[in-house]
Amino acid sequence: MTQLYKRLKIESVMANMRIVEKAIDEVTASLGIKADDYGKILVATLEAVNNAITHGNKTNPEKMVDVEIKYERNKIFITVTDEGPGFDPESVPDPTKPENIEELSGRGVFLMSKLADKIDFNKKGNSVTMTFREVGA
């Protein structure tokens, strides 16, 4: 059974990243998540929230970022949704290719895809769900 562990709605202000970090700390501690898994979950989630605030909502404090953390059978699902127009994740350049090394964009999605076991964007491109498998003590 999927259990909703936590849901946050934050204004698109970078200082609110601390609220998300605290929520990840609380959830992973209560579930007894291993340190390695905690690091992956924290970095990937903060990257997704940073992207939502910066790129999705253009740091407009009137726009909200929704963070939902669910837990089911040793899997954590974290969904981050912004109020922006969305984007096409397939159009993000691979930051590991030599021609893109100097580019600043695209690293967040790449990082999230490496840290999470699976990432899925909604059709609009304003919501990402990251799945972390086999987490636990």
Image: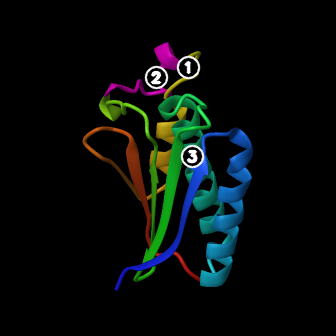
What residue range appears in magenta? 91-100
Query: Which residue is rendered at x = 67% and y = 39% of the image?
Result: 13
Q: CA distance from mark 2 to mark 1?
A: 6 Å
> Would residue 95 appear left or right of 47 to someone viewing this image?
left
**Among the two numbered marks 3 and 2 on one chain, the one whose residue lies closer to the N terminus:** 3
Secondary element at tag 1 = loop
Secondary element at tag 2 = loop
> Would residue 38 appear left or right of 105 to someone viewing this image?
right
Q: Position of residue 92 (x, y in %)?
A: 39, 27
Q: Is residue 96 magenta?
A: yes
Q: Nearer the viewer, residue 82 or 32?
A: 82
Q: Position of residue 55 (x, y in %)?
A: 52, 30
Query: Which residue is rendered at x = 56% and y = 80% of the image?
Result: 136
Query: Which residue is rendered at x = 62% and y = 74% of the image?
Result: 27
Dot 1 surroundings within 10 Å: few (below 14), some, or many (20 or more)?
Answer: few
Q: Is residue 129 above or below residue 110?
A: below
**Residue denoted by label 1:** 101
Q: Nearer the viewer, residue 65 or 40?
A: 65
Residue 115 appears in the rendering: no
Residue kind at label 1, given as amino acid type: Ile
